[in-house]
Image: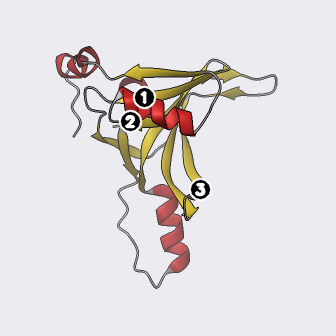
Amino acid sequence: MSATNIYENAPLGSVINYGDHVPRPPVRFTKKLAAWERRNGIGRLVKKTPPREHATWPSPAAITLHEGDFSSGSVILVTVMRTHSIDSDLIFKIIERPAIGMVRVLRVYDGNIELLHLADNREAAALWLAMHPYSHTVLKEVTADEVGADVVEGRTAA
């Protein structure tokens, strides 16, 4: 599946696998392995950026995947996010979609919607938001209608 299909069809919070179908090199080839890891991975879809026209160049639509956090104790030191243009030559696959009843904590700013957290229920989302105050946030529950649309339109998680 292409990045365009992910941009158009995958809901925020989906777990996405991406890669270029090149076999993983042996560990002893550190530079080749590092290059392979940059082009192959898995992450949660946290943002869909619409196309924009800048003064000097056009910017195509893009998707942003949250690949993980590096932390010390309970403090997150580095968050790893990868942004892929919809023009990307990588192959994407939806591994998992958010389940019915889960609640997305979304931040709305500058015409963009970004997933901050995916909670199991509304109480957990409110608790997370109380511990991590953000401005311009919205809680949005994953509904049966949203999941049902994937079945009717022929989209599946695998």
Give the residue at x 68% y 20%: 110
Tags 1 and 2 touching, CB below 8 Å = yes
Describe the colour scheme in one phrase: secondary structure
Asked if one can make out residue 87 in the rendered structure from this viewpoint, the answer is no
How crowded is the residue under tag 2: few (<14 C-alpha within 10 Å), some, or many (20+)?
Answer: many
Location of residue 7 by image quarter: top left
Which mark is on residue 145?
none
Closer-to-camera residue (55/100): 100
Reading the image, the residue beneath label 2 is 119
Judged from this view, the residue extending furthest toward the bottom is 28
Asked if one can make out residue 7 in the rendered structure from this viewpoint, the answer is yes
Q: Position of residue 129 (x, y in %)?
A: 53, 33
Q: Position of residue 98 (x, y in %)?
A: 31, 33
Which kind of residue does numbered mark 3 sit on? Answer: Ile
Up the image or down, 114 lies above or below 83; here it is above
Looking at the rendered structure, the secondary structure element under dot 2 is strand
- Is residue 112 toward the left or the right of residue 25 in the image? right
Looking at the rendered structure, the secondary structure element under dot 1 is strand
- Is residue 88 toward the left or the right of residue 148 in the image? right
Reading the image, the residue beneath label 1 is 104
Which kind of residue does numbered mark 2 sit on? Answer: Ala
Looking at the rendered structure, the secondary structure element under dot 3 is strand
Reading the image, the residue beneath label 3 is 76
